[in-house]
Amino acid sequence: MTAFHSSALDGVARNPALPTPLLLRLLAFEGDGGRPPRDAPRRAGLPESAVALVLAHPHPGARIDFAMSAGAEPAQRARLADDPSPQVRAALAYGPEVYDPRTKVLPLPDAVCARLLDDPDPSVRSALLESPHLAPSFVASMATHHHPAARRAAVRAWKALSAGERSALRADPDPEVRRAAALRECRTDTRLTAALIRDPRSAAEALRRGLLVRADAERYVAERTHLTALAENPSLPADLVERLAVDPDEDVRLAVSLRPELEETRRMAIDFTAGDLDRGDGVRWVRDGLADPEVLRRAATSAHPLLRRAAARSPRLPPDLLRLLARFEDPVLENLLGIHHPDTPEEVLMRVYARLGGTFSAWMAETHPHFPRKGLTARYADHPDGNYRRLAVRDPAATPELIERLSHDPAVRTRQAATRDPRLPLPRLREALHVPELAAAAGANPALPEGEMAAVLDRARVPA
């Protein structure tokens, strides 16, 4: 199979207009690598006949692709729980790898997760415990599991556990489980905190979140041990907070400046630097309260750039706070709004795109539902930068003649965008199927006739 035929086949596998008979033919393909193109098993809304083909495919890679598909229903993926390959079961247990925060993945049913947690292969059990897609109910249910790693993971659902379950975890026979439980409970218990800070494995976290007695706080300030963690501690006496606010270590001063109880005038009087790479995700009280309107308002209206950035990570920002944050000339803040908020204004998205064209943040801005479409032809069709000429393809008013012209553009990404567009004249679309860097885009074009899709499969030697 030559490279461009393979590329065209990859495009057809993504084509939203691919007819079911050709889809089934493609999914049964074993090919040079023994598997269909990866995007075929990962298509959303596969019919039952297609799901059955994937589940029975002899190559584990095809089943792994389906196990990690964000487009498949959890009940469909769950049918791989008894797959003979531990690699497939591990892929199912971990779930889809999602890089777009706007993509939501539904968890597997609790009963399926319970089976995977008792899988005989340790890689499957580990993958499940590392999965970011577990239902809170299942995480809490692991509190009484016979594997210590599962009980340790259950600590993440501490607030959902009963008093008896919490007590059992604090007295667990496994030291790692006991330590994890103690770190949750130490926020209200000075004795637990005192024990945890004597253990090097838990000292920093206990100093960050535990209820401290004054003598311990003074000792660690004097010894200058874990000062950045200590500066975040909610129970740190006010006079020690003031001492750390003028500490020679810039990271310590920054941590103090983010404390929730500070008045704005005191906060901004601290000498700190908010770097351009700091996205605000380390501000725990904001991160833990992104669903709390009061926390969001305090952070979004703060003069501290890291608190505003932390608030920008919430998709629940009310309209007035979104408008407020959109007015700040902070590139990091704008990037975060473009990634996380469903109603980010057009002008913010365009600024992100203009500043960061070709990056993940620019892609998130361009694929945002509020990214502008109308008027882009007039503004950018003849722009000297190919990243901007590519935007003209998004304009509903772009003519077939312009789309064809852009399919010959000097910038390869502009050519590819135009080649994917259904307004591209058919002769040029057929031609692009045989151009190596355009073949995948041409194969994915929904205007590609069924006969041309079948011809791509024929040339790639996909059995009829």
Image (cartoon, rainbow, N blue to C red):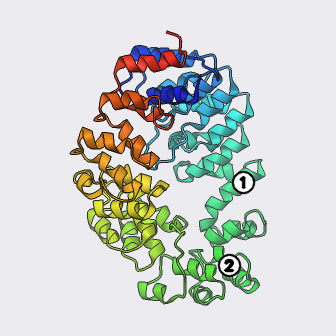
Tell me if I can see residue 327 in this picture. yes
Quadrant where the N terminus sits is top right
Query: Residue 190, image x and y in percent?
Result: 66, 71
State the mark number for residue 227: 2
In the foreground, 454 or 182: 454
Query: Residue 102, image x and y in percent?
Result: 42, 48
In the foreground, 447 or 185: 447
> Is 329 above or below relative to 391?
below
Q: Residue at x 44, y 49 (%)?
A: 411
**CB atoms at circles 2 and 1 under 8 Å apart?**
no
Image side of residue 40 versus residue 312, left or right: right
The quarter holding residue 64 reads top right
What is the crowding at mark 2: few (fewer than 14 residues within 10 Å), some, or many (at least 20)? many
Q: CA distance from mark 2 to mark 1?
A: 25 Å
Give the number of the mark in front: 2 or 1. 2
Q: Residue at x 36, y 30 (%)?
A: 429
State the mark number for residue 178: 1
The amino acid type, in three-letter code, at marker 1 is Arg
